[in-house]
Image: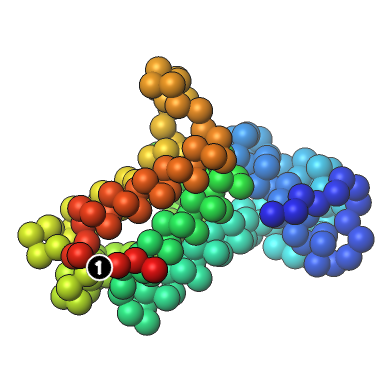
Amino acid sequence: MTKRKAGRPSSKTETRERLIECARELFTVMAYDKVSIRLIAGKAGVDSALIRYYFGNKEGLFETMLRETLAPLSERMENMQQGASQCNLLDIMRTYYQEMTKTPEFPRLILQVMNMPESKVQRRLLEKVIVDISKPMQSVMFDNLLENGVLRADLDPKLCRVSYLSLMVFPFIAPPSMLAIHGIELTDEFFAQLLEHNIKLMTGGMFQTEKVS
């Protein structure tokens, strides 16, 4: 991923992307209520009126930021609707690791927001986005994997789903102090190695014997 050069955006498309990028940077390190439209616009180097123009308000920008960050994962999810397969399932994990390695604070933001009261606007927005994106990830997908002979017949599809999500999400939300005790440093190299390790675990323990391309 090529980082954008600092400075004022030079086009409408770049302005919109810059606002989303700056919003993500701020929302992942600051409380939602502390992130103002003026603060985001100032960081992006644009007039705050452009946030209303592109996104309506701060809520609209927050939701768009969530959707844009998760867009590559959403595309992979849609492939599952066309046919649940071992390769598709592993591609989702690969995509998640690739995208979250770029923004490692983002999974922590999701965890923080989901622990908020249901009345909080950011939780309602996040739940809306997750429901839209994760429809193929619901239990029917793992049931289909079992029916298609992808999952081992002696495994519970619901528990497989929990294990799968744990392998994807936990490394990004684990307390750094706990990881440090075990001598783990979250680097790009570590995530790449962990991804391949998790794929081997799933291939050897969750799936029926099948050669993975």
| Image: 128 above or below 112 | below
Between 196 and 147, the one nearer to me in the picture: 196
Quarter residue 193 falls in: top left
Please provide percent x and percent y for residue 89: 35, 65
The answer to whether residue 88 is seen in the rendering is yes
Please provide percent x and percent y for residue 52: 76, 60
**Number of dots carrying numbers:** 1
Label 1 element class: loop
Between 195 and 123, the one nearer to me in the picture: 195
Kindly identify the amino acid type of the residue bearing the numbered disc 1: Glu
- The residue pinned by badge 1 equals 210
The type of colouring in the image is rainbow
Please provide percent x and percent y for residue 11: 88, 65
Between 7 and 37, the one nearer to me in the picture: 7
Quarter placement of the N terminus:
bottom right
Quarter placement of the C terminus:
bottom left
Residue ranking furthest to the left: 154
| Image: 174 above or below 177 | below
Which residue: 70% across, 62% down?
55
Please indicate whether residue 188 sits to the left or right of residue 19 in the image.
left
Residue ranking furthest to the top: 181
User: Around disc 1, counting alpha carbons within 10 Å, would you say few (fewer than 14), some (14 to 19), or many (20 or more)?
Assistant: few
| Image: 75 above or below 104 | below
Which residue: 54% across, 39% down?
189
Which residue: 41% across, 32% down?
174
Between 66 and 155, the one nearer to me in the picture: 155
